[in-house]
């Protein structure tokens, strides 16, 4: 049996808007992936610990609070410190285009999906970019 | 009626020869819509029983006798960002542009009860609202804005009691007695567990704080709306219109029951309860929702809870156009969406309205975007003539049938909630959360599969689109400035007094006393919001959700 892609969907920071995270989590599961959802109000430390423990291939960070320029780099930094920077980080939320560019160029996110992205686009992106 | 029925059957045979467009004819919430509505569809509607006159029971046609002919709705744009200084300037700008009430947006640390220098606040200070740490910030926020002349709505829930006390204390500093203060605190913790997810304490102590506020307000701040029972966030989390209606009203009933259980008389606090609804893009469904809401609330308050004061029967509400209906693609289209949604809110009889800015799906709004949003309301109010007569859609077969249908469907949910042991039990069973998650998923799939059209997203797409609107950015320097200001305050205030007031609050929280006077003493001594919340957190603990999807 083929190995399944494992994804951690996480809500870092203080904001409680979890609609996007929950829709994506369910969609990825329906697309045949194994999905772990952290729940709300997670610190970068909690997210990285969960990602390592759950042995995931991808961490999806959903942020609407404007704290993305702090939280994305922090998660990447901690993954690196723990020797887990082979885990791919993707993101979504209310993130202005300029910040999306900065996050990708800084190596803090492999891809960022902004409002209006279809579920199929995200599934396809993961299937194309994650090798297991 | 038989004559109509026969004629309809005949018409239907004719009409069925024509081919319809290949789409599902249903509301945005998935409610099937008939091709035509006739008197048959409202056969059981009694004018006096189900509609009545505006300002008269059961208030289907509005809560005031003269509605907008007397006074237009309050134009209340939700605003706040960065620090108290910046937000103070934005409020003055909005008041100068003709806005008639203030609405304060707090940042996430303030909403979650952390001071700006708490490690959890890193990167979040001033981002989605204004940072308020202490009375010092609140005084700055309303500097030069007379609190006896302006009404203020504050979107705060878990720490509502503290922000309310900060507002009362700011009034004192301005020489305005608490009896004169007008405004609203959202203070709707039930919808936090259900949808918005910004909670601190578990439900029981949270409900105690709310009934403490009811009691204190009745005696000392009589013109204040103590809860704004909010469907807005339930809808934004992905619910259908019926779920928004039913869950919001169920929350309202739960507050009424909590007040009665706390020994208050229903007529002492019910007149100060207000509501907050979403106005989504499906025009008629939204109008029917507001009309049904007023009727259901009036009937329950009178018949079930025995309220005698007609003011306790009134469902007054603020509306915000649907943030979740806006698109990042072709953002200027959001101006148009917002205008239709605002029209639905006004035809539905709202008391106050926030129109979203076109750029809100991308960032906090710029001054220009806010001005267009406010102008949208002003054009509606002053140019279109929609405010000239009351409830103009009453008697429409479609509107009345849909209003009835909304009421029926909401009643089914009330039964289900009752069967589950009430709102708190249903929250614990994850009932609301799962219903909303299911609806959100269904909605997203229908857009992905193009069963539902979103202009600019899955149809009429501009492949070469480039974003050319200006976005507001928040300077990271703001966080450092706010932290420095807070730390200076901690050095300069009377820390012995702060400690004493916090100890007194702790003792009150451990017992059964009303906590509001103790919180007021803390804020007057310049204790910070984070310190007060931490004191209560040590007594009450924190709420934890079971993460599901």
Image (cartoon, grey):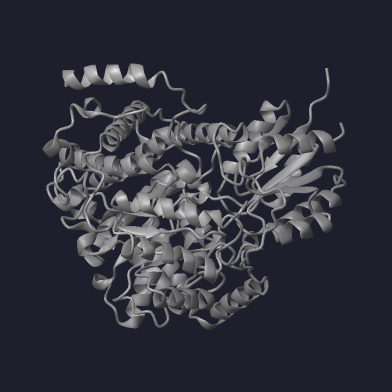
In the picture shown, does residue B169 fall above or below B46? below
Quarter of the view holding residue A49: top right
In the picture shown, does residue B292 fall above or below B154? above
Q: List x then y, in percent, for residue B100.
A: 34, 70
Q: Which residue occupies 44% across, 46% down?
A: B280
In the image, taking residue A118 as reference, residue B167 lies left or right, namely: left
In the image, taking residue A118 as reference, residue B131 lies left or right, namely: left
Nearest to the observer: residue B49 or residue B462: B462
Q: List x then y, in percent, for residue B467.
A: 67, 59
Q: List x then y, in percent, for residue A92.
A: 68, 48
Nearest to the observer: residue B537 or residue A22: A22
Rendered-image quadrant of the C terminus of chain B: top right
Rendered-image quadrant of the N terminus of chain B: top left
Quarter of the view holding residue B234: top left
Q: Is residue B343 visible?
A: yes
Q: Which residue occupies 61% across, 31% down?
A: B449
Q: Which residue occupies 77% across, 58% down?
A: A101
């Amino acid at each position: 049996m083929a190995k399944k892609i494992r994804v951690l969907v996480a809500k870092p920071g203080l904001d409680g808007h979890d609609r996007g995270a929950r829709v994506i989590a369910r969609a990825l599961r329906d697309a045949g992936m194994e999905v772990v959802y952290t729940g709300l109000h997670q610190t970068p430390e909690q997210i990285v610990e969960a990602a390592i423990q759950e042995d995931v291939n991808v961490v999806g960070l959903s942020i609407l609070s404007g704290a993305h320029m702090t939280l994305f780099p922090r998660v990447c930094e901690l993954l690196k410190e723990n020797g887990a920077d082979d885990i791919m980080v993707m993101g979504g939320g209310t993130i202005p285009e300029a910040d999306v560019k900065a996050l990708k160029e800084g190596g803090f996110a492999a891809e960022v999906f902004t409002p209006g992205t279809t579920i199929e686009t995200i599934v396809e992106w993961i299937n194309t970019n994650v090798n297991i | 009626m038989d004559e109509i029925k026969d004629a309809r059957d005949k018409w239907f045979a004719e009409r069925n020869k024509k081919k319809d467009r290949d789409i599902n004819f249903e509301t945005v919430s998935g409610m099937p819509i008939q091709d035509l509505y006739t008197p048959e569809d409202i056969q059981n509607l009694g004018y006096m029983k189900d509609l009545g006159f505006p300002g008269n029971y059961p208030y289907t046609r509005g809560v005031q006798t003269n509605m907008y002919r007397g006074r237009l709705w309050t134009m209340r744009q939700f605003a706040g960002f960065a620090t108290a200084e910046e937000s103070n300037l934005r409020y003055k700008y909005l008041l100068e542009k003709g806005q008639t009430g203030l609405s304060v947006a707090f940042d996430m640390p303030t909403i979650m009860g952390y001071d700006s220098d708490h490690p959890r606040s890193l990167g979040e200070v001033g981002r989605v609202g204004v940072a308020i740490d202490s009375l010092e910030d609140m005084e700055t926020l309303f500097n030069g804005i007379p609190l006896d002349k302006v009404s203020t709505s504050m979107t705060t829930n878990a720490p509502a009691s503290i922000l309310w006390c900060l507002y009362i204390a700011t009034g004192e500093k301005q020489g305005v007695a608490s009896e004169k203060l007008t405004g609203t605190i959202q203070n709707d913790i039930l919808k936090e567990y259900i949808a918005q997810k910004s909670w601190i304490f578990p439900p029981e102590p949270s409900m105690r704080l709310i009934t403490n506020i009811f009691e204190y307000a009745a005696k000392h701040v009589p013109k204040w709306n103590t809860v704004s029972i909010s469907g807005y966030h339930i809808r934004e989390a992905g619910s259908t219109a019926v779920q928004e209606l039913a869950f919001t009203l169920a929350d309202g009933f739960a507050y009424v029951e909590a007040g009665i259980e706390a020994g208050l008389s229903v007529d002492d606090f019910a007149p100060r309860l207000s509501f907050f609804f979403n106005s989504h893009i499906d025009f008629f469904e939204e109008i029917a929702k507001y009309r049904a809401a007023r009727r259901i609330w009036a009937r329950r308050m009178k018949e079930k809870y025995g309220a005698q004061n007609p003011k306790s029967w009134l469902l007054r509400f603020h509306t915000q156009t649907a943030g979740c209906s806006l698109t990042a693609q072709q953002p200027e289209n959001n101006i148009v969406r917002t205008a239709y949604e605002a029209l639905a809110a006004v035809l539905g009889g709202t008391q106050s309205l926030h129109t979203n800015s076109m750029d809100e799906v991308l960032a906090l709004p710029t001054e220009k975007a806010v001005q267009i949003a406010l102008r949208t309301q002003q054009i509606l109010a002053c140019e279109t003539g929609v405010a000239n007569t009351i409830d103009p859609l009453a008697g429409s077969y479609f509107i009345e049938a849909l209003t009835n249908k909304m009421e029926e469907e909401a009643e089914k949910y009330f039964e289900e909630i009752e069967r589950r042991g009430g709102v708190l039990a249903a929250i614990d069973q994850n009932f609301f959360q799962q219903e909303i998650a299911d609806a959100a998923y269904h909605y997203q799939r229908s857009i992905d599969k193009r069963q539902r059209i979103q202009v600019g997203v899955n149809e009429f797409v501009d492949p070469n689109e480039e974003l050319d609107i200006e976005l507001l950015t928040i300077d990271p320097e703001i966080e450092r400035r706010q932290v420095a200001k807070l730390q200076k305050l901690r050095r300069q205030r009377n820390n012995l007094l702060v400690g004493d007031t916090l100890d007194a609050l702790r003792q009150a929280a451990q017992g059964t006393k009303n906590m509001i006077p103790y919180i007021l003493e803390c804020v007057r001594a310049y204790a910070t919001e984070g310190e007060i919340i931490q004191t209560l957190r040590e007594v009450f603990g924190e709420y934890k959700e079971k993460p599901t999807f």
